Every structure is written in C-alpha cells, then in structure tokens.
Image (cartoon, rainbow, N blue to C red):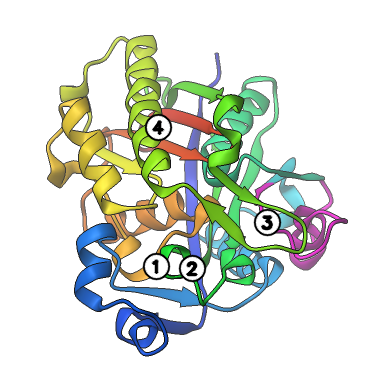
Amino acid sequence: MTRATIAGLGTAVGHRVVTNHDLAESLDTSDEWIVERTGIHERRIGGSCLELGAQAARLALNEADVDAADLDLIICATCTPDQVFPAVANRVQQELGAVCGAFDLNAACSGFTYAVTLAQSQIAAGMERVLVVGVDTLSRFTDWEDRTTAILFGDGAGAVVMTAAQNEDRGVLSTFMGSEGRFADLLVCDFGDYIRMDGKEVFRQAVRVMVAASRRVLEDAGLEASDVSVVIPHQANLRIIESAMKRLGVAQDRAATVLEVTGNTSSASIPLAMNAAREKGAISDDDIVLLVGFGAGMSVAAALLRWGQ
C-alpha cells in the first residue's frame, strides 16, 4: 500500500492575545487557578476559518513546493464553519486557486486526525497530493461570562500537504477512527448558542479513549509505546495530556504541547503542536510520531507516522 507522508506544514493563529490576567478582570478566576487546572496561560482570538485556513495552507504548500493547481483534494476539518454552506474547503480552494475536489469534515477536535486518515486512504487509492486543513474559531461560540469555558478556547489553523512517501518505510503506518455517541451530550453547541460542557466527565472519558486509540494504532503497526519518539495529542487540557501519557507509559517530555499559548483550538490543535515540536527540534527523520485526538461526539482518532519523506 502506498503510504502518505507530510511534505509541508503551515499554521496560523488569531491575531489578538487574551491572557489569564485579562480574563481575571471580568471573571471570578485568576491566572493561578486557570494554569493549575488547564495549563493554559493565554489564547489567540480572531480571524475567520477562511482567513486562518488559507494562511496555513499557503505556508504548507510553499514548504512542500506544491502548486495549489496540482492538488487532487482539499479536506478541511472544522466544527465552526464561517457559514452553514458552502464549505470552508470550497472557499479555501478558491482563495488558493486550486481546481480539485474540496469538502469539510466535522469530527470536532478529532477532525484533523480523521482528515489525515482520509488523506492516507485517497493517496493509497491513487491520488498524489492532498491538502488537509484543520481550522476552528471557537471564540465565536464561547460564553465569555462563563469561567468554565471562557478560559479554554482559542482560534487557529494548521495545514499539511500529504504526498506519497518516496521511502516505503516512511509515512502513515496505521490509523484509527472511533466514536462513542452515548457521550454526545458531554460537549455540545447548539445553533445560536454557546459551548456547554461537563468538564469532569469529558476529562475522564477523554483520557480513556485517547489511550485506547493510541494502543490500537501501535498494535496495528506492530510497535510498542516505547518506540514512540513524540506524541502530538489534542491540546484541550494539559492535565488530560499528562494523565493519558502516564497511562500509555510514555514519558511526559515526549508529549508536544502548545496549548499554553493557544488554548484549545479544536481541529487546529494537533498541527499547531506538531509545528511547535518541529521548530524546537523535537521531531527528526525516522522518528515514530503519534497523533491522537478526542472531541465532541465523543469522537476519537489516532494516526501513527514514521516521519520524513
């Protein structure tokens, strides 16, 4: 089977910085309270899905040295589209000058990893270049007077260009997509309303499904947790990440995080953390990289990659 690999990566975040101290001016909270419970110090706010998604996509295309006109498909993972329709992917396609198929995918915070899985399947089926965009603007659906949710969310985008791996040992090794609809009411946003969340139960279930999905892709690839060089988890809450890493048996310093300065950016969080890890030199060629996300639904997805072309 032809494996897909990441040939280019780009990111974008909201232009306005909202710190914990900013929120403490209007909410019954403090910097210490927020950091202790979430690990978040600040978040980025602003921009549309089209603006942020197109910005990240251009950077990814430039790094991959791929012209938008040569793309075979655009998959945009988002749960906060700018319009009911058309899809954000259609608008991004027009903005980039692409002439391929384009559609949105809503798996909430698992969306980017879902989209990577679909891109792998399309490249295995014969496509050559697939653009995956994860973008969300959760600030538009946040009740800024509710301290349980206002402290969490930010806006951002991340994009990757996926191409056929030149080395058969590189690229996507295994993937998993799951959903447990019985927990759908734990994290909800109705039309015209704000995000509502049962935080404690989301925490408990998130750790469980992240660990289960991670073990699934490792088993399918014939690898162990000790083989993983870097884990790139959904950036919802640092305490969730710490608990999942402990149960998985992977050292905490192998988990890539960026939520400290971005907050929870849903579909954008994994590529944002991936880019931060890469810039720090934490990801090298031939490294085993684990992507794992969870979200409303409750959706969950994991992908295991051997980094490099």
| Quadrant of the rendered image containing residue 247 | top left
Kind of residue sitting beneath label 1: Thr
User: Label 4, label 2: how many angstroms apart (C-alpha)?
Assistant: 22 Å
Answer few, some or many: residues within 10 Å of disc 3's Cα (few below 14, many 20 plus, some between 14 and 19): some
Q: Please state the horizontal and vertical placement of residue 237, each as a whole percent of the image.
A: 33, 53
User: Which residues are the magenta region?
Assistant: 76-100
Q: Is residue 220 above or below residue 194?
A: above
Q: Which residue is mark 1?
A: 262
Q: Which residue occupies 32% across, 26% down?
A: 211
Secondary structure at badge 2 equals loop
Q: Please state the horizontal and vertical placement of residue 223, each as a whole percent of the image.
A: 26, 15
Secondary structure at badge 4 equals helix
Kind of residue sitting beneath label 2: Gly
Q: Which label number is shown at residue 58? A: none
Q: Which residue is mark 2?
A: 154
User: Label 2, label 1: how many angstroms apart (C-alpha)?
Assistant: 6 Å
Image side of residue 151 versus residue 176, left or right:
left
Kind of residue sitting beneath label 3: Asp
Q: Which residue is mark 4?
A: 205
Secondary structure at badge 3 equals loop
User: Label 3, label 4: how many angstroms apart (C-alpha)?
Assistant: 41 Å
Q: Which residue is mark 3?
A: 67
> Closer to the N terminus: mark 4 or mark 1?
4
> Closer to the N terminus: mark 4 or mark 2?
2
